[in-house]
Image (cartoon, rainbow, N blue to C red):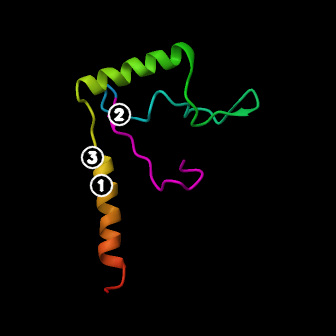
Amino acid sequence: MKAKNLISKVVPVLKDENGNWVRNPQIITDAYVQNGDIVYGENKSGEDFKKARAWVNDKLKNNDCDFSLLDAEVDKVVWIFANLFPAA
């Protein structure tokens, strides 16, 4: 969606066991082309999808989401609208 300019920013909300941010593990983000087809941003399939889905479901069940990056991006957009647009 970002490549098509339908959204302006994407931020992860999940962290792994080491505290590193993790993009949606259910989506292919580590390759752009496979077998001549564009796959970046497509859903994984088979066992890879099942493992990723189980990991995400576990995070969601434990309410283990961190929205701090999203909050920071929203704050940035709000600041731009509040401070850089001419007063009415």
Magenta region: which residues?
1-15
Q: Is residue 68 above or below residue 29?
A: below
Circle 3: element type: helix
Residue 77, by quadrant, is bottom left
x then y, percent, for residue 52? 44, 21
Residue 31 screen position, x and y as percent: 62, 33
Distance Cα–Cα, label 1 vs label 3: 6 Å
> What crowding class fits label 2: few (fewer than 14 Cα within 10 Å), some (14-19), or many (20 or more)?
few
Amino acid on which disc 1 is placed: Ala
Residue, x 47% and y 56% (percent of image)? Answer: 8
Residue where numbered disc 2 is placed: 20
Q: Please give the label number shown on residue 68.
A: 3
Sequence order check: which comes first, mark 3 or mark 2? 2
Residue marked by disc 1: 72
Marks 1 and 3 close (CB-CB < 8 Å) = yes
In the image: residue 18, left or right of residue 39: left
User: CA separation, marks 1 and 2?
Assistant: 17 Å
The quarter of the picture where residue 75 lies is bottom left
**Circle 1 sits in a helix, a strand or a loop, which is it?**
helix
Does residue 10 show up magenta in the picture?
yes
Taking depth in this image into account, of 16 and 85 the one nearest to the observer is 85
Question: Across the whole image, how many numbered discs are drawn on residues?
Answer: 3
Name the magenta segment's main secondary structure. loop
